[in-house]
Amino acid sequence: MTASEADTLELPPVPEFGNGRPRWAAQRIHPRRLARGHLAQWARIRAWAVATGHPAPGPARARRASGLAAAALLAWRTGHQQPQLLAIAAAAYTVTAWRAGRPVPPTPPTEEELRRRVVLGVQQLLGDDPAVFLRDVYDALQARPAAAHLDDTRLRAVLLGCGITIHRSVRISADKTGRSGIKAADIAALLSPDPVDPPSEAVDAGQPPTEGAVDQA
């Protein structure tokens, strides 16, 4: 599975706070960013005040509590003497809260995660059946927006890149057989945390493999 095909398996992340959205809708979402930034700011201040992670939290808390008390007294006196400074401080805090509330882009899934999602999707199509026809898998994948533009050839390449074995003929029931498809046993083996390796030599049914065989003279 190439990188270009892996990118098509997932839809792009939905932007937050109005990027790429109508203008008025973006204005309605902006206060949510300010609220998130405000909570992030207070969480940082609280962690600093209680000396989280400090090697000597007791003395550090006392010193920082004294500093916060002095800052609160200075802000109270300044608010009575020069109210315009409080307005400037509030504007500065709003800017810092806006920056702190910036949405973090989601981490793109790895190629291994994308492969597992494809395998899980095939498992959902299988349900309780022993197999599923390849045509049904193609139709189900092409019905999703992320893979709607992929043809059968590229979808087959994606399935093979995920390690899925495609059989020329599978049997679902007495009246559903003779078409290419995927077996549930193969999907279960891919999702198993400890897959069992097949024996290196063919063994007849009901006969255990020969152990400690000795070459004849």
Image: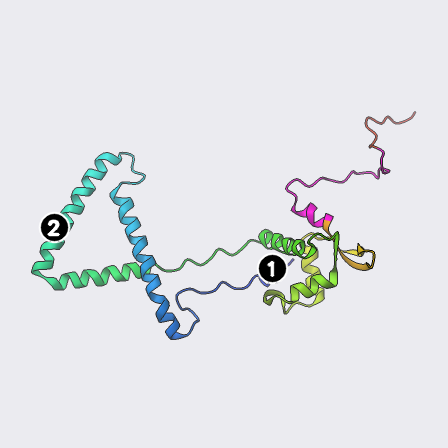
Q: Residue at x 26, y 34 (%)?
A: 56
In the picture, measured across the screen, residue 197 lies left or right of residue 55, that is: right
Gap between marks 2 and 1, in whole Å? 58 Å
Q: Position of residue 134 (x, y in %)?
A: 74, 60
Q: How many C-alpha atoms fall within 10 Å of the one at disc 2: few (<14), some, or many (≥20)?
A: few
In the picture, measured across the screen, residue 113 lies left or right of residue 123, that is: left
**Residue at which label 2 appears:** 73
**Residue at which label 1 appears:** 6
Residue 52 visible within the image: yes
Helix, strand or loop for the magenta stretch, by majority: loop
Q: Position of residue 195 (x, y in %)?
A: 69, 41
Task: Identify which amino acid the numbered label 1 is placed on.
Answer: Ala
Check the image and report above or below for 33 versus 21.
above
Check the image and report above or below for 71 versus 146.
above
Q: Quadrant of residue 4?
A: bottom right
Name the element at disc 1: helix
Residue closest to the far left: 81
Q: Are marks 2 and 1 in contact (CB under 8 Å)?
A: no
What residue span does the magenta drawing correspond to? Answer: 185-207
Check the image and report above or below for 138 versus 50.
below
Q: Residue at x 29, y 34 (%)?
A: 55
